[in-house]
Image (spheres, rainbow, N blue to C red):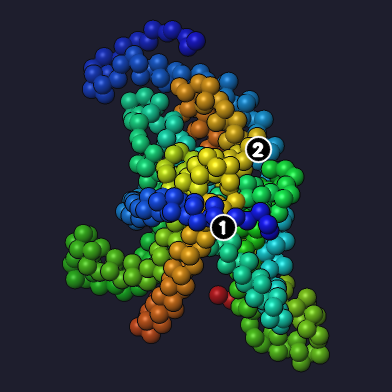
Amino acid sequence: MNNWNWDIFFDAFPIVIQGLGITIGLTFACYIFALVFGFVWTFLRRIPYKPINWIVTWVMEFIRSTPPLVQLFFIFYALPMVPVVGVALDPFTSAVLGLGVHFSTYIGEVYRSGIEGVEKGQWEASKALNFSTTKKWTKIILPQAIPPTIPMLGNYLIIMFKEVPLASTIGVVGILQMANDYGAQHWRYLEPLTIVAILFLVLSYPSAILVSKLEKKMNRRFDKKAPTGSKPLKEEGKGAVM
Amino acid sequence: MTPRVRLPHPGGLTLFLMLDQSFYKGVIIIFSTIGEVFPVLLKGIEITIVVLVLSAIFGYLFAFIAGLCRLSNNLILRKFTGFYVEVFRGTSLIVQLFWLYYAIPMLFGFDLGSNLLAGVLAIALNYGAYMSEIVRGSILSVAKGQTEAATALNMSRFQRMRFVIFPQAVRMMLPEFGNYLIQMLKATSLVSLIGMTDILYHGNILRSSDLSAAPTVYFLVLVFYFIIALPLIFLTRKMEDISKKGVAS
């Protein structure tokens, strides 16, 4: 333990923490992208035409079962080389696109579970009241489908926060990249990397507690109001993502 | 390098899509390099699978040990495992990997020996922590009546766990364990960052020698991972069926 040096710790701390803004900003940028794009997957999967449904399902399966790291590399290094559609993106945009698309497949499943949790009577009522498709979704289905999924969505925010350091591999200067740079300059990896670990723990642990509290609160709320016949939310493929 | 072929001009459609010769050249490059890229990536499959199998074995082992420890009567053991689980769930895998690989040798003055050990240990500890929660949750969710019945049959604490609770709990764990196996496969791609020669490592080398091959390289890498993941996807579905069979929902 005598290799631990507090001087280096305090020297590195202000440098590493400079990357925190980028890390948190990237997390929210990816998250918002995934929240929006998740809807695309959800509605694509609802197309009542077998071949399209099948293709969408397997594309989602492909995206979620291949490493996000490779997807980042694909978007950053390979996309500019693809003819016609190829565009060169800066690291931050690539990371938003790569991680956002990866996580949107998970978020899409969350929405789906929420929509499936909406009672059948609500669909029938919207038809009986002659609601248009747009009105049906915006006024009846989604307002009931999304709130119960908020704890799950919160969990995904925390999971994404822990995935964001992957972006350091394509040059997004978050806290991990700051620590690596510091390590390369001073040939001391121990303290800066420990700072990164502590920062992650300090930020993600309280948010995890907050989300689980929210989950309990929501469960109580929706359990009380839930009429008989509504299904409990079940999410497929739940769990940490890498 | 690339074959110079004159392609027939498809007429008005070309103008409409704004495609020209360079488009075809690009497409030809992408397809003509598959032959070169494929065998190189194939060399990395072995490492990826070795890392996956080892991390899965150790990951499940850590999960069961930590999950059972968290249900133990011993307060210190419970708190200690709780600490381990929260630390590894609260930080990201890539940070843990770098920490094990770069920081541990500095802190304790000894090397973990190889990057294989550091990689496997990081993945196994991380996913062991996540999966220990599943072990714990499944054991806790076995109906109380089962424990009471086993007690009524004069079974010891160990016998209750071994013959009554555990077999029922394992069934519930199976689908989630399958999901985590796919997650672990995805995580193995990170070991290329600490210098292990897995699929992605070979892909990165190819890309750095020929930038225009990047689309082929990374698409093939993705396909490779997907092909390894396919049996795991079907295994997970199978496990879902097994865990549902004969259980009143």
Residue A6's label in the rendered image is 1
Residue A163 on image: x %, y % = 48, 52
Within 10 angstroms of label 2, few (less than 14), some, or many (20 or more) residues?
many
Q: Marks 2 and 1: same chain? A: no
Q: Nearer the viewer, residue A138 or A106?
A: A106
Q: Residue A241 placed where, x, y %?
A: 52, 55
State the residue at coordinates (47%, 72%). A209
Circle number at residue A94 = none
Badge 1 local density, few (<14 within 10 Å), some, or many (20+)? few
Observer able to see residue A18: yes
Q: Nearer the viewer, residue B219 or B126?
A: B126
State the image quarter where residue B147 is shown: bottom right
| Viewer-side residue, B130 vs B223 | B130
What residue is shown at x 50% (from left), y 32% (from top)? Answer: B218
Depth check: give the residue in front, B30 or A47: B30
Residue type, numbered disc 1? Trp
Residue B214 on image: x %, y %: 48, 27
Kind of residue at disc 2 = Met
Reply above or below: A62 against A236.
Answer: above
To which residue does mark 2 refer? B196
Q: Is residue A84 above or below residue A9?
A: above
Q: Quadrant of the N terminus of chain A?
A: bottom right
